[in-house]
Amino acid sequence: MTDTLHSADTATPRNDENWWRDAVVYQIYPRSFADSDGDGLGDIPGITSRVPYLRTLGVDAVWLSPFYPSALADGGYDVDDYRAVDPRLGTLDDFDAMIVALDEAGIRCIVDIVPNHTSNRHVWFQEALASPRGSAARDRYIFRDGLGDRQELAPADWTSAFGGPSWAPVGDGQWYLHYFATEQPDLNWKNREVRDDFLHTLRFWSDRGVAGFRIDVAHGLAKELPLVLPSQAELDALPIDGTHPIWDRDDVHEIYAEWRTVFNSYTPARTAVAEAWVKADRRARYASADGLGQAFNFDLLEADFDADQFRRIIDFNLAQSDLSGSSSTWVFSNHDVVRHATRYGLPALHGRDVKQGAEWLLSGGRSPIVDVTLGLRRARAATLLEFALPGSAYLYQGEELGLPEVAAIPDAERQDPAFFRNHGTDIGRDGCRVPIPWTNNGVSFGFGSALPHLPQPTSFGQLSVEAAENDPSSTLHLYRDALSIRGRLQVRGKLQGGGLEWMETGDAAVLAFRRPNGWITVTNFGDTPYELPAGEVLLSSSPLSNRVLPGAATAWLQE
Ligand code: NOJ
């Protein structure tokens, strides 16, 4: 090993404390990435085998969604054991070998931590079930007595994030809180043992060479439930201003201050990024250097492909990162939302939920409302814009292939609890979790040697890595070229804090900005062709003719 990561021109020393500030982080959903042993589930050796691919793509880090032992009641976000690898996905030795391979390729590894809830198979929950009310074992979770003469009624009418009730009975008159699926009991973060155990987990993975953590439901850990529980309607009416009984409480940051002491006991300090669905102006608290250090901003992911919305979001988030001293994060796709190549082909959201497209999803993709070509054009344009922004970009596996959301999954093969708990009225998130196609042909298009755990459409063959390799105009080549140019222009960190300067374009549908080194990005959100300003063209998301940028396209220029 050398003491730098990546090739000489974009070298990041291994002890660089600021590597995350402008990192390109590639999210791997391990069970759908690469299956090395032919059981239909992606695994850790599968990831290791694809390190050369990740290296060529040019990402700085990978973030692994949960790979821990799990009954998969929620795609692995129901964790049985936080300090082990699901035996179907490999062993701890396989994990260590993956870290070595990634490190040799100059790629850091971030792992997902799921602290709001365990799975119901976790040894603690099993102990709680076997222990009486009032016991220390039950105190690790949130138990309440039921209402009614025989305590046969839920303590409150709260609904879970996946639909259905969020209190479940355990048979002795007590009920437990599960804000997500029934199999995901919420932990009691007032309990010192719970706190200490997670500190142990953070050290466990840090000691194995993990560079950072993605924190699931970071805004939900601290809870202060009154003796008499409010109704769901009353809960919904309470302001989320730091005092809400469940969400985004100010005291959640006491937990992260403890975590920070663990992160900072390593060299370089371990990093963390909060998944905190909070009001935009409260996000900076999670990104503070005394806490997790960085927080996801999902604003672009929730926006339409629209110049005004993009500009407002970019300005706001750059100002927020100045406030927190962190760097901004940019995300278009992840394992929870409709892939952006599809989203951008759907009718505009105008501020509605990103799960929109429900009509199309529910029709199994038969409804013609998606404009596939336009969706991909816009996705490519948006990504090129994203890569030029100050801050870090979080990519989701398969977006570099321009993969669409898969709507046509037979009900019998669906896995997402959101589908089951809503009796099929919410189709859930399986459509963005379909295994990656690596080759044009084969039983699972090179994902593995067996049928994959979620079915791939036949169209995946043409969208495979192999097909993209052979097509110079593919989205894969665009991503590689863009990341290589970005690496060179960023000169690792030197542009950090440099911000951007908006340029006058004379067209409300066209945004243009300049970075301090003369790197210019022009995005045409409309459909009227736009003449590019002066400068050498570095790259464009769609072909240009005579320096004219077509609609739904981005170009990079060097002044
Ligand atoms: C957020 C994760 O991204 C999602 O996939 C999961 O279902 C919930 N948290 C619950 O852990």
Image (cartoon, rainbow, N blue to C red):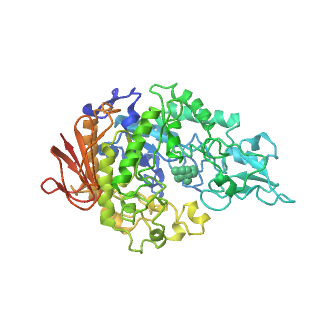
Indicate the position of residue 307 as horizontal and vertical percent values.
Answer: 33, 54
Which residue appears farthest toward the left when viewing the image?
546
- Left or right, residue 160 beside residue 367: right
Judge by depth and name the residue closer to the eye, 364 or 66.
Answer: 364
Judge by depth and name the residue closer to the eye, 221 or 95.
Answer: 221
Judge by depth and name the residue closer to the eye, 270 or 316.
Answer: 316
Residue 214 can be seen, yes or no: no
Which quarter of the picture shows residue 402? bottom left
Say which residue appears at 25% left-offset and 44% top-offset.
503
Which quarter of the picture shows residue 105? top left
Give the position of the C terminus as an image quadrant: top left
> Is 455 placed above or below 96 here?
below
Say which residue appears at 30% left-offset and 55% top-offset.
380
> Is 274 placed above or below 492 here?
below
Which residue appears farthest toward the right when viewing the image?
149
Q: How many marks?
A: 0
Residue 476 can be seen, yes or no: yes
- Left or right, residue 266 beside residue 161: left
- Left or right, residue 100 beside residue 117: left
Say which residue appears at 49% left-offset and 36% top-offset.
287
Give the position of the N terminus as an image quadrant: top left
Say which residue appears at 54% left-offset and 70% top-offset.
412
Indicate the position of residue 421 as horizontal and vertical percent values.
Answer: 61, 64
Indicate the position of residue 437 as horizontal and vertical percent values.
Answer: 36, 59
- Left or right, residue 404 beside residue 80: left
Indicate the position of residue 417 as horizontal and vertical percent values.
Answer: 58, 60
Judge by depth and name the residue closer to the eye, 44 or 338.
Answer: 338
